[in-house]
Amino acid sequence: MKPVISIGNQDFGSIRENGYFYVDKTDFIQEWWENGDVVTLITRPRRFGKTLNMSMLEYFFSNQYAGYSRYFEGLQIWKSEKYRELQGSYPVIFISFASVKGATYQDARLGITRISKESIFSDLNNLEIVTTDSRKYETAFGFNREEVERVLMEFGCMDQLEQVRYWYDGFRFGSRTDIYNPWSITKFLDTGRFENFWANTSSNSLVGKLIQEGSPNIKVDMEDLLFGKNIETPVDEEIVSVVYYQPQSEEYVPENDPRLVSEI
């Protein structure tokens, strides 16, 4: 019997409790824990399992879920006695902004509760940034070739492997050039159709804004892409995030305002 695919479910406990389709990513727990980074920022495109993996970490480490070892039994992490002893042994604060949507800064800001920078985020100067070029966690987000082949075998779709590769292979994280978007794979398994599922999860408003307001070179690059050409551009991994807030007011502070208070 084929497992049930719970489309859009980002709660690890719900998926495991109900026996829904799940690709084992618990190796990420050990890899992250043993790296010992104080603060980690992992950048991945949307719909690559970021929220689900964070939910997995919460269920594994949080003392709120002590005694929920059944969620991890049969998974890779549970083969290690050392990590079995860690399950449910730490206080964990889990905050997700995954449901916050907004076309503008002001719209998105309405959906976010203000969190004191001095408390939770005081260690951001020790931030470890894991970009798409980093080999850290390169297989933790997205499905790799071996996982896709196992999934297709499980669902009796192995005869469609080449079409799946044609439609959904093409992402690169670290040294892996065979990463598939999980949303596209699960939607294909659920519907049995080949469609551009990932692109349909968001609008192209950012691209339109870029074309309208960008330099002439950007417009030329966009035209080249539309005509099937390739472009090469350097990737700057030195991410700088500028934080704007005015402690005594809810008023939005524009970028060039002298009340800019901090740069991370």
Image (cartoon, grey):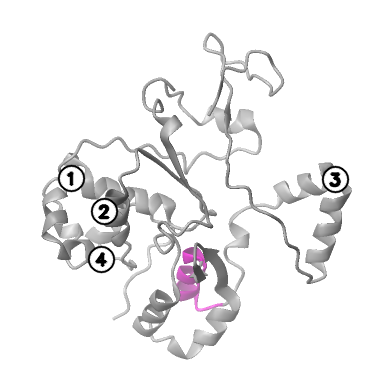
Q: Which mark is residue 215?
A: 3
Number of marks drawn: 4
**Residue 246, x across and y down, in percent:** 57, 14
Most common secondary structure along the magenta stretch:
helix
* Disc 1 + disc 2, Cβ < 8 Å: yes
Magenta segment range?
Answer: 181-193
Residue 184 within the segment the image draws in magenta:
yes
Neighbour tally class for label 3: few under 14, some 14-19, many 20 plus, Cα within 10 Å: few
Sequence order check: which comes first, mark 4 or mark 1?
A: 4
**Residue 151, x across and y down, in percent:** 38, 77
Of tags 2 and 3, the one toward the viewer is 3
Identity, as a three-letter code, of the amino acid under mark 1 = Tyr
**Residue 159, x across and y down, in percent:** 47, 91
Sequence order check: which comes first, mark 2 or mark 3?
A: 2
Q: Which residue is mark 2?
A: 13
* Disc 1 + disc 3, Cβ < 8 Å: no
Apparent side of residue 175 relative to residue 234 in the rendered image (left or right) = left
Neighbour tally class for label 1: few under 14, some 14-19, many 20 plus, Cα within 10 Å: some
Neighbour tally class for label 2: few under 14, some 14-19, many 20 plus, Cα within 10 Å: many
* Disc 4 + disc 1, Cβ < 8 Å: no
Q: Which residue is mark 4?
A: 19
Rendered residue at 40%/25% (across/down) = 122
Neighbour tally class for label 4: few under 14, some 14-19, many 20 plus, Cα within 10 Å: some
Q: Quadrant of residue 121?
A: top left
Q: CA distance from mark 2 to mark 3?
A: 47 Å
